[in-house]
Structures are given as C-alpha cells and as structure tokens.
Image: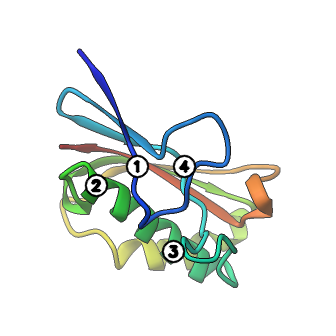
C-alpha cells in the first residue's frame, strides 16, 4: 500500500519532520494536534479553547483527506493535567456523535509549545 502525506493550510503546519497526517489504504492517521491557531501559530487561551482548536485542526486535516469527524474510529487525547479531563471531555463531546470513537486519554509531563492538550485520530477515508 502507498502512503500519501496530507497537508492543509487550514491546520497548523508541522513543526518537525512529520506530516500533518497520512493516508494509507482506507485509513487516515492525523499527527497530534495542539490548540494552535493556524493563522497566528499561537496557542488558544485555556484548556477548553485549546481542545476546541485542536479538534478543529484535526477536522481540517481529515477534510483534506476526504474524510470527516463522523468517520473517526479512534482518538488519543494527551493532557498536561488530568484534572482538566472533564473540561476537555465536554468540548470533545460537542464534536462527536454516537457511535462515539474509541478513545484513550493520558496525562503527560509536557506537550510541545507547552500546550495543555493534544489530540490525534485514526479515521476511515
């Protein structure tokens, strides 16, 4: 199977040697998305705003692949502080409908650019 890199200006550009996402067969894999505002490269203010922006960035990458949030089968949520789980969960729930994707959520020591949340997904094309 061939691997196709994804790139869209509707999401922040990669800040290292990786792609915003890749398509392999019928699957789309996004790189972890912070709450970076594409136009400014700055983090949104607060964990809820960062979660919302991260999911909008994921959405933009999926759309560049011809996919969408409704086709997400698995998400991974990285949190700087697990005490923010309920806030992020509320935002997350506004982006997805049943049947919800499978999900993991983990607390990490630090995220790039000192973000508060990072989200990556796997979706059907």
Q: CA distance from mark 3 to mark 4?
A: 12 Å
Circle 2 or circle 4, nearest the eye: 2
Residue 13 pos. (x, y %)? 55, 55
Mark seen at residue 7: 1
Residue 85 pos. (x, y %)? 60, 68
- 57 horizontally vs 99: left or right: right
- 108 horizontally vs 6: left or right: right
Q: Which residue is mark 3?
A: 53
Q: Which residue is mark 2?
A: 64
Contact flag, marks 1 and 2 (Cβ < 8 Å): yes
Q: Residues within 10 Å of mark 3 (few under 14, many from 20)?
A: many
Q: Which residue is mark 4?
A: 32
The quarter of the picture where residue 44 lies is bottom right
Q: CA distance from mark 1 to mark 2?
A: 7 Å
Residue 114 pos. (x, y %)? 80, 62
Circle 1 or circle 4, nearest the eye: 1
């Amino acid at each position: 199977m061939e691997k196709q890199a994804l790139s869209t200006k509707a999401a922040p550009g990669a800040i290292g040697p990786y792609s915003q996402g890749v398509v392999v067969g019928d699957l789309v894999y996004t790189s972890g998305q912070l709450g970076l505002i594409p136009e400014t490269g700055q983090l949104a203010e607060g964990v809820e705003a960062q979660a919302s922006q991260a999911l909008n960035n994921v959405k933009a990458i999926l759309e560049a692949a011809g996919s969408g949030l409704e086709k997400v089968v698995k998400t991974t949520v990285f949190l700087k502080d697990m005490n923010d789980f309920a806030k992020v969960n509320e935002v997350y729930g506004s982006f997805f409908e049943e049947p919800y994707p499978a999900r993991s959520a983990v607390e990490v020591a630090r995220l790039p650019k000192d973000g508060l949340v990072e989200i990556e997904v796997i979706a059907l094309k």
